[in-house]
Amino acid sequence: MTIVHVQSANGGSNASAASCSATFGAAVGSGHLIAGFAFWPEAGGTTLLLSSISDDKGNTYTIVDKVSATPIGTNRDFASFYCANVTNAPTVIMANFSPSTNLIAILVDEYSGVATVSPLDGHAMQVQAAPGTGANAVTSGNFTTANSGDLIYGGLTCLNGSSSGTGAGTGFTLRINNVAPNGSNFFDTEDEIQSAAGSVAVTLTLNVGDDTITGAMAFSPPGSGGGGSATLMGAACL
């Protein structure tokens, strides 16, 4: 079975709120995967918590990596999450925070053809201070997958809102491209199919310099299951 991108959605709030949502144009298909990223700031010197990801049909989401850019002097946080084998056709996916704050965002993509049991096959997330505008300079950092034919899914936030465009990494296809659903920070998602198991990284190219957080998750095709590595670099784990 071929892994196929189905649809994307994003949403956010510039005003103070306890949650933000992304609404798909059509109900998620039976057995499909929802994968995505959430973004939030740290306000008043207190760590703001991403308390959960939820949807309008009560599905359970796994938060994979959750990191802060405070080590490079930027009070911004990013998280990756997913829900596999969705069967009850949700359309609205929500990121929930405590306490309320502004400049929050959520990005989500739907895929068919992913393993319905234990699909996660490795993940990574990296904070970079001014990685520059060189080709593939923005990266999640390398991690190792155990299964061939994985979906390699990535997300990016430009922390200072100065991005005027983002190019896909070599071999990747942009899905959500340089949007600012929270009114400030720019975001992208992208994907590729990894033909053979091994070391891999999500990469992108910025047109304008900025600080970044880049996350990656690998999802296996049916009949393989998880088992890859995890990498977190240049970040404070939350």
Image (cartoon, rainbow, N blue to C red):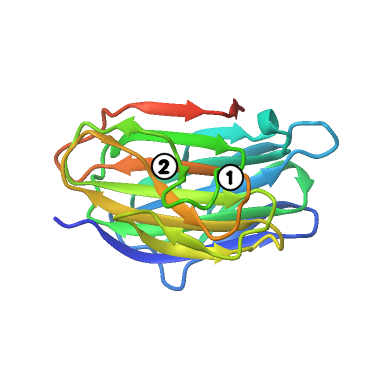
In this picture, residue 33 sits left or right of residue 193: right
Would you name the residue on which mark 1 appears?
A: 212
Disc 2 crowd rating (10 Å Cα; few below 14, some 14-19, many 20+) is many
Mark 1: amino acid = Thr
> At which x and y percent is residue 173?
35, 61
**Which residue lies at the image location 32% right of the left edge and 41% below the top edge?**
218
**Which residue lies at the image location 52% right of the left edge and 48% below the top edge?**
37
> At which x and y percent is residue 52?
58, 41
User: Can you see residue 91?
Assistant: no
> At which x and y percent is residue 72?
68, 33
Disc 1 crowd rating (10 Å Cα; few below 14, some 14-19, many 20+) is many
Residue at the outermost right position: 44
**Which residue lies at the image location 78% right of the left edge and 46% below the top edge?**
100
What is the total number of numbered labels drawn onto the structure image?
A: 2
Would you name the residue on which mark 2 appears?
A: 216
Q: What secondary structure is found at the residue carrying circle 1?
A: strand
Quadrant in which the C terminus appears: top right
Image quarter of residue 88? bottom left
Q: Is residue 190 above or below residue 165?
A: above
Q: Nearer the viewer, residue 35 or 148?
A: 148
Q: Is residue 66 above or below residue 57?
A: above
Res 107 label: none
Q: What secondary structure is found at the residue carrying circle 2?
A: strand
Q: Is residue 175 above or below residue 145?
A: below
Image quarter of residue 211? top right
Mark 2: amino acid = Ala
